[in-house]
Every structure is written in structure tokens, then in C-alpha cells.
Amino acid sequence: MSTMQIDSGLYISEKALVRVQQLLSEEGKGDDYFVRISVVSGGCSGLSYKMSFDNEQKPADQVFYDKGMKLVTDMKSVLYLFNTMLEYSDGLDGKGFHFINPNASRTCACGESFAV
């Protein structure tokens, strides 16, 4: 089974890209690592985001490239994540990664979970 590669559909902002590159460097992870994003059950709105660094691609993974960064998700999650932007904030409102998801019909107050 071959992996599907798409040039758009899952995006990363410039700020998130810089932060991901910093974290990969700090953790000593090489160029073979990428960002894995998935959607799991949980949170007060029903679904939560999960993000990690990975270097093992699975046969059914959906692969996206944005700004030179490889973003990977599983077949189930891509249905919830299509056209989603991975963003990073370092301001007074909070520090960390968050997602701008046009598919979400509602999100919880903390922004950690969503519903479609």
C-alpha cells in the first residue's frame, strides 16, 4: 500500500515552523523527523488534538508539505483536520501550539478540544 502525498490541506504558520525547528534541534532529532498530528476522542467538546514528532511513517498515513515541513496524519484524522493550520503563540494569552480548524463547529474555552 502506498502513502498518499498532498501538497496542501494541512498547514503550519511561520511562527509554528520556527518553534518546531527549534524543538527538533533541541531534542537532537534529525531531518528524518516530522510532525504527526492526530485527532483523538476526549476533552470537554468531544475531540482533542494530539501532536508529536515521529520518524516512522505508516502505510495509510496522509502526508502534507507546507513551508518545507512534513506534516503527517492518519486516515481517520484527516477528515477532521483538512485545511487546518498549526499555529504557535508566545504572547500573554498563553504560550504553545494551537490549531485553527475551519471544520470545528465549536471549541472549549481552553481551546484544547473541539467538535464538528
Image (spheres, rainbow, N blue to C red):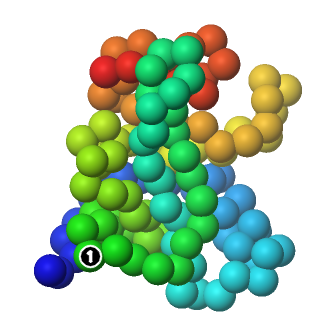
For the C terminus, the image quarter is top left
Q: Quadrant of residue 3?
A: bottom left
Residue 112 sits above or below residue 107 on the image: below
Disc 1 is placed on an element classified as loop
The residue depicted at 39 percent of the width and 77 percent of the height is 57
Does residue 5 appear in this view? no
The residue depicted at 82 percent of the width and 74 percent of the height is 26
The residue depicted at 26 percent of the width and 76 percent of the height is 59
Q: Quadrant of residue 1?
A: bottom left
The residue lying toward the viewer, choosing from 96 and 90, is 96
The residue depicted at 71 percent of the width and 73 percent of the height is 24
**Which residue matches tag 1?**
59
Left or right of 90: which side holds 80? left
Q: Quadrant of residue 87?
A: top right
Give the percent coordinates (x, y) of residue 80.
31, 37
Instruction: Tell me the kind of residue under disc 1.
Output: Pro
Left or right of 1: which side holds 106? right
> Which residue lies most toward the left here?
1
Does residue 89 appear in this view? yes
Give the percent coordinates (x, y) of residue 45.
48, 16
Left or right of 107: which side holds 102? left
The residue lying toward the viewer, choosing from 34 and 9, is 34
Residue 4 sits above or below residue 86 on the image: below
